[in-house]
Image (cartoon, helix red, strand yellow):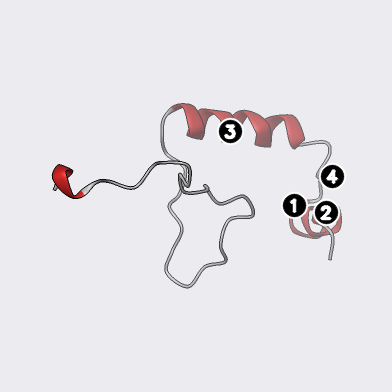
Amino acid sequence: MTRERAEWELFGSGWDETYDQKLAEYERLVKDGMLPTPKAGAAAPSNPKQPLRNKPPRSRNEY
């Protein structure tokens, strides 16, 4: 089922019609640091942060 159809069946409005409101709400959540945290067992994000691989290894004197 597409987002458009799901929203039409649930709320009687089109997904594209309410996109501006959805975007505004998402941007407010980001600005306020209120995005939901992933739950255990949830699917991984599509663009996970890559670890720093170019960092040189520490020498024994640094421990």
The crowding category of the residue bearing disc 3, from other C-alpha atoms within 10 Å (few below 14, some 14 to 19, many at least 20), is few
Residue in view at x 52 percent, y 28 percent: 28
Please name the amino acid that badge 1 sits on: Phe
Mark 2 vs mark 3: give the one in front: 3
- Who comes first in sequence, dot 1 or dot 3? 1
Secondary element at tag 3? helix
Q: Earlier in the sequence, mark 2 or mark 3?
A: 2
- Where is mark 2, residue-wise? 8
Q: Residue at x 50, y 33 (%)?
A: 30
Taking 51 as reference, is 13 left or right? right
State the image coordinates of residue 63 (x, y, percent, origin top left).
13, 48
Mark 1–mark 2 contact, CB under 8 Å? yes
Query: Do the residues bearing badges 2 and 4 touch, measured as CB atoms within 8 Å?
Result: yes
CA separation, marks 1 and 2?
6 Å
Quick check: 40 above or below 2?
A: below
Badge number at residue 14: 4
Badge 4 element? loop
* Between 59 and 18, the one nearer to me in the picture: 59
In space, the residues marked 2 and 4 are separated at their CA atoms by 6 Å
Question: At 79% from the left edge and 59% from the top edge, which residue is drawn?
Answer: 6
The amino acid type, in three-letter code, at marker 4 is Gly
The crowd level at tag 1 (other Cα within 10 Å; few <14, some 14-19, many 20+) is few
Q: Position of residue 62 (x, y in %)?
A: 16, 43
Secondary structure category for the residue under label 2: helix
| Disc 1 target residue | 11
**Residue type, label 3:** Glu
Q: Which residue is mark 3?
A: 25
